Structures are given as C-alpha cells and as structure tokens.
Image (tube, rainbow, N blue to C red):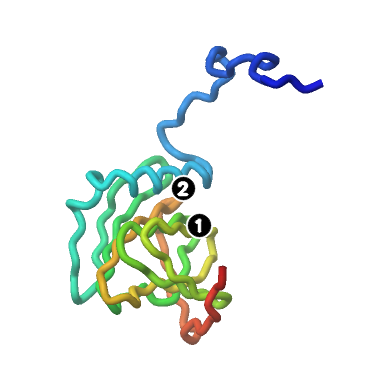
Amino acid sequence: MNSDNDLQIAGDILEVPHLLQPPREHPVTVAEFVGLARSIAADRSQWAHLVRYDATTRWYHRLRTGPGYEVWLLSWVPGQGSGLHDHGRSSGVLTVLEGTLTERTERATRALAAGAQRVFAPGYVHEVVNDALEPAVSLHVYHPGLTAMPMHTAPHCEARPVTA
C-alpha cells in the first residue's frame, strides 16, 4: 500500500548523514565530468577573463588539472577548425561556452550553440569547426589527460544534418 507521503515511510535521507555519499573533490564518472564542465561554464569568472583570440591558429589554455583529468579552454575565430581527429585513449566532454561550433562525424553534422555538450569515448573521430561569422569559445574536459590527438586523413566528413 502506498502512502501519500513516502517520506513518512522512508524518512528524510538528509537526516541520516551516514547514508549519504561524501562529495568527491575530483570527478571520476562521466556524469561528474559533465557536471564539472557545466559548473565551470556557469561561472564566467573562472574563464571569461582568460579568453584570447588568435587569427592564425586556435588559441587554447589549460584551465585546470586534477588526478587523471585536464580542463582546457579554447577559442575559435570564424573559419578555424580542429581537423578530423580522435583523442587517443582519452574520453571527453565538449561544452560550447559562447558562439556556435559545428561538429562533423561520419554519421552526422551538428550545430552546437552555447550550452551544448557532447560526450565522447576513446576512439571517437570528429572534426569541430567554427562555421559561424562570430568567434566561439569552448571548454574541453579529458580523462585521462590528453596525451594524443591523432589526425585522420579520411576525406572531409560529408554527413547529413541531424534533425531533431
């Protein structure tokens, strides 16, 4: 039989601190890395003053490191792109902070506006490009820290757009 108030049956979890997981100082799960990226994105004071734009090459800055992970801040002026690549043995979270970036894979092309996130596993091959007319800024979390970014020589990804 269900009660109108399940809290009466189970009790308030906050009243039994021994049942709560202690907060982790550093993320270790995919969800925690996504959460880290979201929290940094939401706090412009952590990154906005660091952003620089370089017309000749993508600008990047290592924002933070932790046990087994790195957080990078990148800027993209119109026309700049990453080239087709993977991230070696690293998994990652890509978060667009400002502007719009285009992600191309062999399966799809996605426009990623500010706030969009992509999560990827080792071996995920993609290309990220600023196809817009305005600069863009993105945040990248890699676990383990990025040690390789193999470039792929396959033809340019000519994928069909993803429809919602």
Q: Disc 2 residue type?
A: Val
Q: Dot 1, crowdedness within 10 Å: few (<14), some or many (≥20)?
A: some
Q: Residue furthest bottom?
A: 155
Give the SS element for disc 2: helix
Query: Which residue is tagged 1?
Result: 119
Q: Residue furthest right?
A: 1
Q: Which residue is mark 2?
A: 34
Q: Name the residue located 44 percent from the left edge and 76 percent from the top edge.
A: 84
The part of the image, by quadrant, that contains residue 1 is: top right
CB within 8 Å, label 1 to label 2: yes
As drawn, is 19 to the left or to the right of 43? right
Residue that appears at 48% across and 63% down: 88
- Closer to the chain start, of discs 1 and 2, is 2
Between the residue at mark 1 and the residue at mark 2, the CA separation in whole angstroms equals 8 Å
122 is higher (above) or lower (below) than 127: above
The residue tagged with tag 1: helix, strand or loop?
Answer: strand
Question: As drawn, is 70 to the left or to the right of 163?
Answer: left
Q: Residue at x 19, y 66 (%)?
A: 53
Type of amino acid under label 1: Val
Query: Where is residue 7 drawn, in percent x and y?
Result: 64, 18
Query: From the viewer's perspective, is residue 5 above or below residue 160?
Result: above
Camera-nearest residue between 66 and 33: 33
Q: Position of residue 105 (x, y in %)?
A: 52, 74
| Residue 90 in picture, x, y percent from top left | 48, 57
Q: Residues within 10 Å of mark 2 (few under 14, many from 20)?
A: some
